Amino acid sequence: MLFRSPLSFKIKFPGNCCWNLSNSQARYLNLTLLNRSSHMIVNYGENGWQIISQRAHGLLAGEICFNWKKEGRPQRWLETILATAEHDDAFNEFDNDHILLNENGGPVNFKMRKFEKAKCEVLLKQALTKSRYIALLTSRHIRFLYGTSEDKSAKIYANGLKKIEKVWMEEIGITEKEISSAYSILEWCDAFSLLICQKLIQPENRKIEISSGPDELCYQLHAPQENILNVEPWPFETEQFEVRFESKTISQLKFKNVEEFRKILIKTPPEIHAYRICKS
């Protein structure tokens, strides 16, 4: 079978920011960042399925958030870090999730998941047991994911959260501006983590946008060396730091049922991935 090399092109953003991507990469990234749901991240490689749990991805986002510059941190900083690390913790592949396989018996990647109201409810209830502030950030994340969804029920649910958010903000005395700024940090760190976990970092030191962040700047990511990442402009407190996350690689390509897949997933030893994030 012959494969054609996709055409390469550039996508421009405000502030002269751009992605140098192929057609196929651009379509993939669009599906990933604009229509993503919560669930494990599945990458296919020469050794089989690489599985990154939703909670491992969230923890990586929390590690990134932890290093944010002090002058830009919200007053309730620890809660912001916790909300970032736990922004999709309702999904637990080891325990309570039964939509783990597709119709062919392979693991389901998070982009294939549809809106699940029950999961959103669990996520919000978990957040409320911690604080109204964490619940607000969690609600904002749900609205970010589904507020413009083509799924009518998802859109209605997400937009309905606006009313309860107003009540929570009044209860804890926080402004719309404060919570929006804090959420923009969470969303930025989530996007950064997803780029790493999905192996979307571009080769040959090419730049890719992360997200705009709380200051509406165009932050770009590139890799001058393997496992070394540069971010421009620099949004962190120290000039460099390390982050780590775990994945599991399963050589078996097809599974009889969810129970078989889960059993193998739990028993498979983890692989540790480390990146040094440095100022250019």
Image: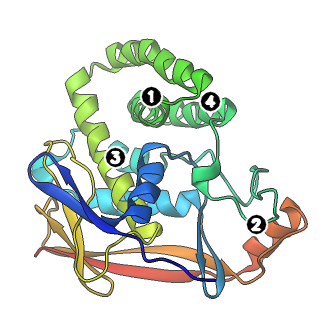
Question: Dot 4: few (<14), some (14–19), or many (≥20) neighbours within 10 Å?
Answer: few
Q: Which residue type does callout 2 highlight?
A: Gly
For label 3, the residue is 186
Quarter-of-image position of residue 182:
top left
Residue at point 87% right, 63% down? 259
**Considering only order in the chain, which callout, 4 or 3, is on the residue closer to the N terminus?**
4
Closer to the eye: label 3 or 2: 2
In the depicted structure, whether residue 200 falls above or below residue 252: above
Who comes first in sequence, dot 4 or dot 1?
4
Q: Tell me the CA gap for discs 1 and 3.
A: 19 Å
Residue at 51% over, 47% down? 36
Q: Position of residue 86 (x, y in %)?
A: 49, 49
- Judge whether residue 135 can be spotted in this image: yes
Marks 2 and 4, the one that precedes in the sequence: 2
Q: Secondary structure at mark 2?
A: loop
Please name the residue shown 53% across and 74% down the image: 246
Residue under label 4, please give it: 121
Amino acid type of the residue that numbered disc 3 sits on in the rendered structure: Leu
Viewer-nearest of discs 4 and 1 = 1
Does the rendering let one see residue 39?
no
Cα distance between the residues tagged 4 and 1? 19 Å
- Mark 3 nearby-residue class (10 Å; few <14, some 14–19, many ≥20): many
Q: CA distance from mark 3 to mark 4?
A: 20 Å
Q: Nearer the viewer, mark 1 or mark 3?
A: 1
Disc sitting over residue 106 in the figure: 2
Q: Are marks 4 and 1 in contact (CB under 8 Å)?
A: no
